[in-house]
Structure formats: C-alpha cells, structure tokens
Amino acid sequence: MIIAYSTAPNETIANEIAHYLINKKLAACVNLIPQVKSIYHWDNKIIEDNEILMMIKSEKSKQQNLIDTLVEIHPYDTPEVIIIPIENGFKGYLNWVHASLN
C-alpha cells in the first residue's frame, strides 16, 4: 500500500482529480485537505499559494500508473506527486483498500 500526496489549485480541480482516480481504480480513497498554504520557488520568485492537499491511498502495483496519470491530468506544469509506503495499519482498512482497487 502507498499514500501519494499531491496539491491542487482549488477544491473543484481536486474533486475532479479524486473522482477520476477513483473511477480508474488508481485510488481507493482520496482525502481533500483544504486551506494548505504552499510557499515555494518558481521562476526565480518566492510564491505563496493557497492549495488543496490530496492524500491518495492506493497500492504499490499502481504507483507508476498513478504518477503518470496525475502528471497527465493535472493543471500544473510540474505537479507535486510524492509517494510514501504504508508499512502497517489496521488490516481491515488495508484489506478494503486492496478490494476497492480490484
């Protein structure tokens, strides 16, 4: 199992991405966490943006497809896509994630 983190510029786009990933069975669940403030360098400037954080639960076997899909459908030129392995958790939930992706 994995968790992928990505940000979106607003709730509408984050919601569209979440639905797309779930419909394609690349994600079992996507949590949308509002009001994330991101501060970063871009084009030699320091940028401050309000964004939505997407916490995407999936399986390692779908990891590369998930990354490729996020890069393809995301409105940003260089979207954040960070993958973190899930080492342990409640077996009932992890089984549900697995069953949701098949």
Image (cartoon, rainbow, N blue to C red):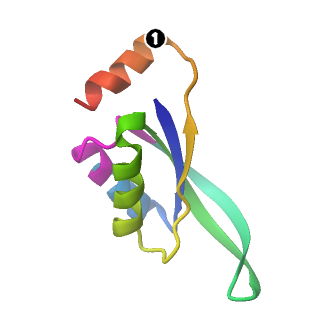
Please give the residue where the numbered disc 1 appears in the rendered image: 91
Q: If the image is split into quadrants, where does the C terminus sit?
A: top left
Rendered image quadrant of residue 44: bottom right
Q: Is 24 within the magenta?
A: yes
Q: How many marks?
A: 1
Binning the other alpha carbons within 10 Å of mark 1 as few (below 14), some (14 to 19) or many (20 upward) gives few
Magenta extent: 20-30
Image x and y of residue 50, in percent = 63, 67
Which residue is at 34% across, 67% downward? Answer: 73
Image x and y of residue 89, in percent = 55, 17
Q: Is residue 49 above or below residue 31?
A: below
The residue furthest top is: 91
* Depth order, front residue of 85/40: 85
Image x and y of residue 57, in percent = 44, 36
Image x and y of residue 64, in percent = 39, 50
Which residue is at 65% across, 57% downward? Answer: 36
Q: Is residue 3 above or below residue 90?
A: below
Asked which secondary structure carries label 1, the reply is: helix
- Disc 1 marks a residue whose amino acid type is Lys
Which residue is at 58% across, 63% downward? Answer: 51
Which residue is at 73% across, 72% downward? Answer: 40
Rendered image quadrant of residue 39: bottom right
